[in-house]
Amino acid sequence: KWDQNRFYIEVLIDDVQLDNKEIGDLEPNELGFLTGYERAGKKYYFNSEFVAITNRTYKASESTEWFTHRSLPIGYHLGSDLMGVNILTRYYLNNNWSIDGEIDVLQQGEGNLAKPWDTPWEADGITMDTGYSEPFPTGIVEETLGLQVTTRRQWSYERWLSISLLYQDIENFGNIEGKSKQNFEVALTASWSLEFETIFE
């Protein structure tokens, strides 16, 4: 940290092959990397973040070990086999009103958490001499560009109301080459804590 700035980085080592003696050692490394920068001014906030997570990270041969709580990934919320950039800016009109602008660029490979665990390095024809490698992200890559604008009215940390407009342009939708899709969403979100107190005599 320095002044109003903060830089952060996270490195995840899920599974790394250090030996090179048998076919199982050809399994690609499962790694995650996230880095970001944020700055908080008097009337604005800025954040940029980059993430890259290789195929099969968070996965295991036993599918029940992929999740920990309510079927959500144990790590990054979008799973694995992906690379993305997110940029968020927030401007405070006053103490109660703010406006957000957000850009999200994501590349999602075929090795998402919906795909069963596989071991292509054990296929016929793969030897220690031929080796095994795969691109990153893997297979047909789904590419998403998301643009979002949000207006928020805040009375306190527990009481606020926001409305968001989201547009997404998706190429190779569902990891199907040439298939495209556009999304437009309007979301209304609110949080309002209620407190009641009485005294019995």
Image (cartoon, rainbow, N blue to C red):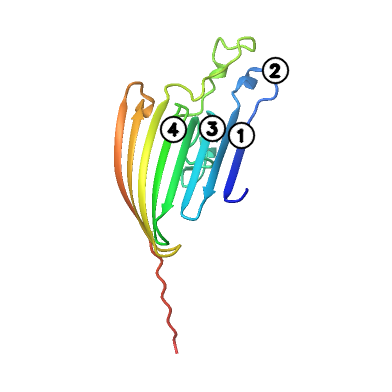
Relative to 81, say whether 134 is above or below.
Answer: above
Residue, x 40% and y 63% (percent of image)? 159
Chain-order first, disc 1 or disc 3: 1
Type of the residue with mark 3 = Ile
- Discs 1/2, front: 1
For label 2, the residue is: 21
On-image quarter of the C terminus: bottom left
- Whichever of labels 1 and 4 marks the residue nearer the N terminus, that label is 1
How busy is the neighbourhood of tag 4: few (under 14 within 10 Å), some, or many (20 plus)?
many
Rendered image: mark on residue 14? 1
| Mark 4 vs mark 3: in front | 4
Of the residues shown, which amino acid type is indicated by label 4?
Answer: Leu
Q: Disc 4 marks which residue?
A: 106
Where is residue 145 shown, x and y percent of the image? Answer: 38, 33
Q: Earlier in the sequence, mark 4 or mark 3?
A: 3
Given this view, does label 2 or label 3 mark the residue nearer the observer? 3
Q: Residue at x 44, y 63 (%)?
A: 158
Distance from the alpha carbon under mark 1 to that under mark 3 = 10 Å
